[in-house]
Image (tube, rainbow, N blue to C red):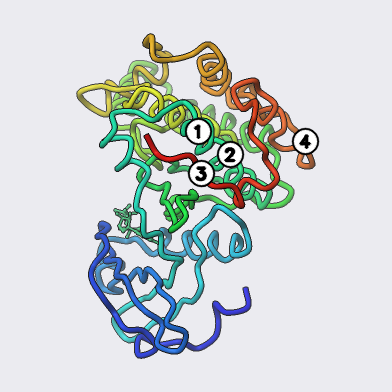
């Protein structure tokens, strides 16, 4: 990325209002003095990051955004720099905010909007997966809208970059072997069962409860199609206003996810139901698109009848439908 490493400093920007706050960052609207261009600058306090042990989160976000610097549909990291106490991430500014805001305001989106924004999201997922990056926290809060109301994918703190030679089956075998070894370490079977049942309740996961996939809950090997599960959840939410798996606690949501316990209301047309059903499959390899080869990824999703009428190649040059 040509600009990321050039030596910028806070003095090169005029800091304006706070756009948002994360758990360990503040995002400012800022203007680059030299060019007059607007950016969103995410400022993270180093001591806070160390105290909260979030170094990995920051590293992951930076590495993924570097790899995706020329990818359309993804927030661009223009520069990074630091001073003694803070880290600065200079990002494309998305003035129209989060897609979630529109879903919540309108209750749901028109089918034309759902089709268009699902198509843009799929394009962004294709870009990430081409680089072997799993986002792992796709949700409507992380889908930002630029000045022209095109979608920009943000927040790569939970992402995972898979090695080039990554093989899901080999990784999964290793996890199974480790599990067996751990189980054999104790010969008290009641003790194992007890520990396992406690584990179910204390499951640790990357992502956000409503969008987390069964394999993540299960502690299985990472898979690109974890993002396709969340993609199915987001399409569902754009149509109905709420995500498919809901409950009073994370634990209850996880039970529903593991049992694939969700229903379609009358708001869903047949093609949308069919697409969502083909994405929300318990086994990652059975999700629509999971078996596409690298060259044609995700043509099996693009050619689903739900997307009829979408012109994929110049989608970023098209005028998005008015949000309603
Ligand atoms: P957490 O770190 O707790 O997961 P987060 O990911 O929302 O929270 P940030 O990435 O720091 O935290 O973002 C804080 C807020 O700033 C969010 O509400 C987000 O919508 C907004 N924001 C982040 N980046 C941009 C951007 N490039 N353009 C416009 N708004 C942004």
Q: Are marks 4 and 3 in contact (CB under 8 Å)?
A: no
Q: Are marks 2 and 1 in contact (CB under 8 Å)?
A: yes
Question: Mark 2 or mark 1, which has the lower sequence index?
Answer: 2
* Mark 2 lies within 8 Å of ligand 1 (Cβ measured): no
Q: Position of residue 82 (x, y in %)?
A: 39, 82
Cα separation between marks 4 and 2: 16 Å
Question: Comparing marks 3 and 2, which lies closer to the viewer?
Answer: 3
Q: Report which residue position mark 4 lands on.
A: 293
Task: Classify mark 2: helix, strand or loop.
Answer: helix
Q: Report which residue position mark 1 lands on.
A: 231
Question: Mark 3 or mark 2, which has the lower sequence index?
Answer: 2
Question: Mark 4 or mark 1, which has the lower sequence index?
Answer: 1
Ligand 1: quadrant of the figure: bottom left
Question: Comparing marks 4 and 1, which lies closer to the viewer?
Answer: 1
From the viewer's perspective, tell me whether residue 188 is left or right of residue 150. left
Question: Comparing marks 3 and 1, which lies closer to the viewer?
Answer: 3
287 versus 323 height, above or below: above
């Amino acid at each position: 990325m040509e600009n990321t490493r050039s030596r910028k400093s806070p003095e090169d920007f005029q800091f304006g209002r706070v756009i948002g706050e994360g758990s360990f960052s503040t995002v400012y609207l800022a203007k680059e003095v030299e060019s007059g261009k607007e950016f969103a600058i995410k400022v993270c306090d180093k001591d806070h990051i160390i105290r909260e042990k979030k170094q990995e989160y920051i590293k992951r976000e930076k590495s993924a955004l570097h790899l995706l610097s020329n990818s359309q549909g993804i927030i661009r990291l223009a520069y990074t720099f630091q001073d003694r106490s803070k880290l600065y991430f200079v990002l494309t500014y998305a003035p129209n905010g989060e897609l979630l805001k529109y879903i919540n305001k309108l209750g749901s989106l028109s089918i034309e909007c759902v089709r268009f924004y699902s198509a843009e999201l799929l394009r962004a997922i294709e870009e990430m997966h081409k680089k072997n990056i799993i986002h792992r926290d796709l949700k409507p809060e992380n889908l930002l809208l630029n000045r022209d109301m095109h979608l920009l994918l943000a927040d790569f703190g939970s992402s995972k970059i898979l090695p080039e030679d990554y093989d899901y089956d080999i990784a999964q075998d290793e996890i199974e072997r480790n599990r067996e070894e751990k189980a054999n370490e104790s010969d008290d079977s009641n003790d194992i069962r007890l520990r396992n049942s406690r584990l179910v309740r204390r499951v640790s996961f990357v992502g956000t409860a409503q969008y987390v996939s069964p394999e993540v809950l299960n502690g299985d090997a990472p898979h690109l199609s974890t993002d396709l599960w969340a993609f199915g959840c987001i399409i569902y939410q754009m149509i109905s206003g709420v995500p498919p798996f809901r409950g009073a606690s994370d634990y209850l949501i996880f039970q529903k996810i593991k049992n694939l316990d969700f229903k379609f209301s009358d708001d869903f047309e047949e093609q949308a139901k069919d697409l969502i059903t083909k994405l929300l499959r318990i086994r990652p390899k059975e999700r629509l698109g999971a078996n596409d080869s690298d060259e044609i990824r995700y043509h099996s999703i693009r050619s689903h009848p739900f997307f009829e009428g979408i012109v994929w190649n110049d989608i970023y040059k098209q005028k998005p439908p008015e949000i309603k």
